[in-house]
Amino acid sequence: MSFNTEQQVDIILNEFNKCDILNAICCNLCNSTKKYKNNTIQITRAPEPSDIMWQNLGVDPCDRLGKMFLTFLVTSVFVGLCYLILYYLSVAQVILI
């Protein structure tokens, strides 16, 4: 959805996120989600186009998670090897002194 002015955006966001006391006390409905035809909708400001990584839009979430795990694994192995090298160097330094 697009608006003509910033004021229209502020009005919609304020109305959508408004919480009355009855809902807050009784129904706990004071969150930023609403229902429309049994589907939950959430209204937030759209990110700036320059903040979107357009090249990642077609990437499957499972592939992205796999790449993140692989990166974590490689980094962990590298840090572990560095730790072992420093440990054995400190042991060798104590022995040689």
Image: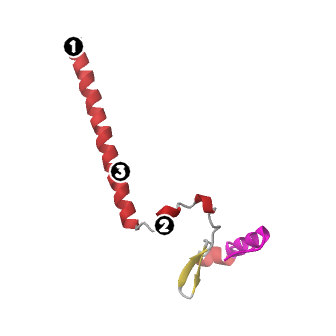
Amino acid type of the residue that numbered disc 1 sits on in the rendered structure: Leu
Outermost top residue: 97
Residue 81: image quadrant is top left
Outermost bottom residue: 37
Residue 24: image quadrant is bottom right
Mark 1, residue position: 96
Does 82 appear above or below 30?
Answer: above
Mark 3, residue position: 71
In terms of secondary structure, where does tag 2 sit? loop
Q: Position of residue 28 (x, y in %)?
A: 59, 74
Membership of 77 in magenta stretch: no
Which of the two discs, 1 and 3, sits closer to the camera? 3
Mark 2, residue position: 57
Does 10 appear above or below 82?
Answer: below
Which of the two discs, 1 and 2, sits closer to the camera? 2
Amino acid type of the residue that numbered disc 2 sits on in the rendered structure: Leu
Q: Residue at x 70, y 71 (%)?
A: 13
In terms of secondary structure, where does tag 3 sit? helix
Label 1: how many Cα within 10 Å (few below 14, some 14–19, many 20+): few
Q: Nearer the viewer, residue 93 or 66?
A: 66
Q: Which residues are magenta?
A: 1-21
Outermost front residue: 55
Does 48 appear above or below 14?
Answer: above
Membership of 13 in magenta stretch: yes
Instruction: Name the side, left or right, on which 73 lies relative to 95.
Output: right
Residue 14: image quadrant is bottom right
In terms of secondary structure, where does tag 1 sit? helix
Q: Nearer the viewer, residue 26 or 71?
A: 71
Amino acid type of the residue that numbered disc 3 sits on in the rendered structure: Thr
Work out how far the residue at label 3 is from the one at label 2, CA to CA, in angstroms. 20 Å
Work out how far the residue at label 1 is from the one at label 3, CA to CA, in angstroms. 37 Å
Q: Residue at x 69, y 75 (%)?
A: 2
